[in-house]
Amino acid sequence: MPRESKKARKERAGEIFDILTAEYPDAHCELDHVDAFQLAVATILSAQTTDERVNMVTPALFRRYPDARALANAGQEDVEDLVRSTGFFRNKARNIIGFARGLMGDHGGDVPKTMAELSVLPGVGRKTANVILGNAFGLDEGVVVDTHVKRLSTLLGFTAATTPEKIEVDLMDVFPRERWTLLSHLLIWHGRRVCSARKPRCEACALSHLCPSSRV
């Protein structure tokens, strides 16, 4: 692809965002939750597994431990049994219990609304904090970079970086703040439905004329 100016990249990014918004008007976080606490726990559990798998285990988990106070007092083995099928269950159980204890100890059981406060809690890195802030509180502090976002950002020519941190910076540079949260959902939905890693369907892709990696 010819060298693209920053202005041209931003214009192309705007076109891509508008097209994806039209393609996926219902794009949203696919982790089932009713509040910030449930979203945070589900996001921690979603590491290296699918949202579908997490949604299979969280109903029983939240029935047993509906809030931070209950989960903070949970036994490690009991939680392990409930989240076992998500993989890495010992570490995940330890993290969500630690997260709940952090909420109780430092925030009165409530999920904080700042990146600084969230990112120091057990199991919460910048990606998880971005999920919570954007989807539970409507705060666009960054872009969630998961495997789909990472792959599509590269294919679409928005970044040459390889780390989530640098990819996020590149995306934040070409998309306006008010689009950051929705952007990740749009890219994830497109990655799951059209631009799959194993067999991208370029012939059915609404972005093919704007994508430097298109095969058509």
Image (spheres, rainbow, N blue to C red):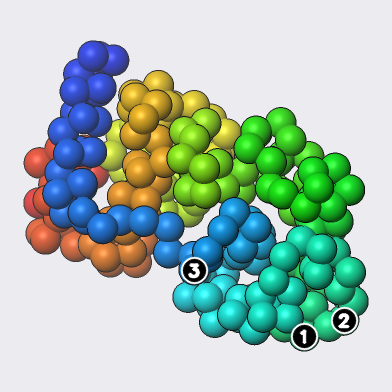
Q: Is residue 216 left or right of residue 3?
A: left
**Is residue 139 or residue 24 the one in the foreground?**
139
Please say if the residues under marks 2 and 1 sit with CB atoms less than 8 Å apart: yes
Which residue is under mark 1? 81
Answer whether residue 199 is visible to the viewer in this image.
yes
Marks 3 and 2: CB-CB under 8 Å?
Answer: no
**Image depth: mark 3 or mark 2 in front:** 3
Residue that numbered label 2 is attached to: 77
Q: Residues within 10 Å of mark 2 (few under 14, many from 20)?
A: few
Residue occupying the point 65% across, 66% down = 45
**Nearer the observer, 9 or 41:** 41
Q: Which mark is residue 32?
A: 3
Determine the CA span between mark 3 and mark 2.
24 Å
Instruction: Tell me: residue 110, above or below residue 79.
Output: above
Residue 151, horizontal then vertical, whole percent: 40, 49
User: As rendered, which of 68 and 56 lies closer to the eye?
Assistant: 68
Q: Amino acid at mark 1?
A: Asp
Q: CA distance from mark 2 to mark 1?
A: 6 Å
Q: CA distance from mark 3 to mark 1?
A: 20 Å
Question: The disc labelled 3 sits on which kind of residue?
Answer: Asp
Of the residues shown, which amino acid type is indicated by label 2?
Glu
Picture layout, residue 1 above or below residue 194: above
Residue 108 located left or right of residue 136: right
Looking at the rendered image, the disc whose residue lies closer to the viewer, 3 or 1, is 3
Among the two numbered marks 3 and 1 on one chain, the one whose residue lies closer to the N terminus: 3
Image quadrant containing the N terminus: top left
Circle 1: element type: helix
